[in-house]
Image (cartoon, rainbow, N blue to C red):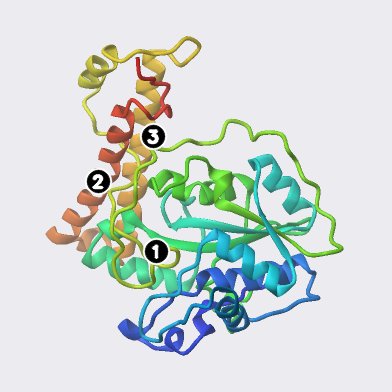
Amino acid sequence: MRYLIKSQLYSDAESQLKGSKQILDDCTWASCAAAITWASKGELNPSAADAVAVMKQVTGRKDVQGKSDNGGSQPEAIKVIAKLGGKARYAKSWNDVVTAAKSGAALLIHVQQPVGYPAGIKISAWHDRWFKWWSKHKPEKIVAGYGHMVSSAWCEDHGFQFACPTRDERTAAEKYAVPVTESQLRQIANSKVKAGKGYKVDYKTVLIVTHPGKKVTTVLSPAPTPVVANPKPAAASPKIVRPEIVQEPPKKLKRNINADVATAIRIVQKIGISKGDQTMREQIVAAALDALQAALSTAIAVFLGLGVSIFDLTGDGAKAVAASAISAGLLVLQRWLDEDNSAYGRTRK
């Protein structure tokens, strides 16, 4: 069974405006509508607009048109799912996420799109336009990404499916979710962790959505070593779509590489390494490879976003590509130097 998109492009009047007047701040509610439709096997079939109406009842909040003010949180999503006729709970581990999905549940995932996303994942035509515009005008926006709520599910025919509510449900090409592997879905769920946006492990960004009568197995065992990030507070939010939805503060993001290895070795020598952790050399290699991947993937993404041939790349374009790669690289160095971040095996003495 294919996962139906409930598009926030039609959730209210402001979402249907064109250009800079368009406000997309209903991703949480659109994703709630898609999730309950899947979990109920179509018994319930609310639109994104229906979910927005329910949100107003549950929260008592007004959605002022022309203003990005309708972002949603996980606790609010749980209440809206309940009002729609389903049940949403926090995932207990990544194993819990996978088992629940394979038992028929839908997943609501709080992300920092497209930070750390797998290369080649087709998000939406709307996202492609967003990416291309910011690649030309302010590449650091690509590195920072934007706060968003997406959904997912699993079936035997298509495996895991990833649904961004910026997809257009009225077009054949975007009517359904995109097939992804479990590994790719976990990378997507880890985007908030990677961006340092308040989550320490990937599965905590996930809500499991079920419907009465549809049994879903609960797995209490811990996930296999979840990814831990440097818990730093988010910066101030920018324009389009408020925090919990489409667009958040530009914070230097991604991982790093171009750090001088010799200098890195001297720094690591001053840091205590707990028993059983990686050796110093393994830490350096891990950080270097991580950083190289971040720098290269960011540079390639920004270059493709410019939409020009490599032979037509101007000085400004080259600077944008270089700046994005360096920004991504420096963030890994920052995380590696943080004694409270154990991602590379370091511990504070």
Q: In this view, does 271 lie above or below 164?
A: above
Residue occupying image coordinates x 38% and y 83% = 22
Q: Which of marks 1 and 3 is in front?
A: 1
Q: Is residue 26 left or right of residue 40?
A: left
Q: What element carries label 2?
A: helix
Q: Which of marks 3 and 2 is nearer the N terminus?
A: 3
Residue 230 is situated, as x and y percent measured from the top left of the image, at 38, 37
Q: Is residue 3 left or right of residue 72?
A: right
Mark 1 residue crowding within 10 angstroms, few (<14) / some (14–19) / many (20+)? many
Residue occupying image coordinates x 62% and y 76% = 175
Question: Is residue 177 among the parts visible in the rendering?
Answer: no
Q: How far is mark 1 from mark 3, CA to CA?
A: 27 Å
Q: What element carries label 1?
A: loop
Residue hosting label 3: 290
Residue 281 is situated, as x and y percent measured from the top left of the image, at 37, 15
Q: What residue type is labelled 3?
A: Asp
Q: Nearer the viewer, residue 127 or 65?
A: 65
Q: Earlier in the sequence, mark 2 or mark 1?
A: 1
Mark identifier at residue 327: 2
Q: Nearer the viewer, residue 27 or 162?
A: 27
Q: Which of marks 1 and 3 is nearer the N terminus?
A: 1
Mark 2 residue crowding within 10 angstroms, few (<14) / some (14–19) / many (20+)? many
Mark identifier at residue 243: 1
Residue occupying image coordinates x 22% and y 67% = 137
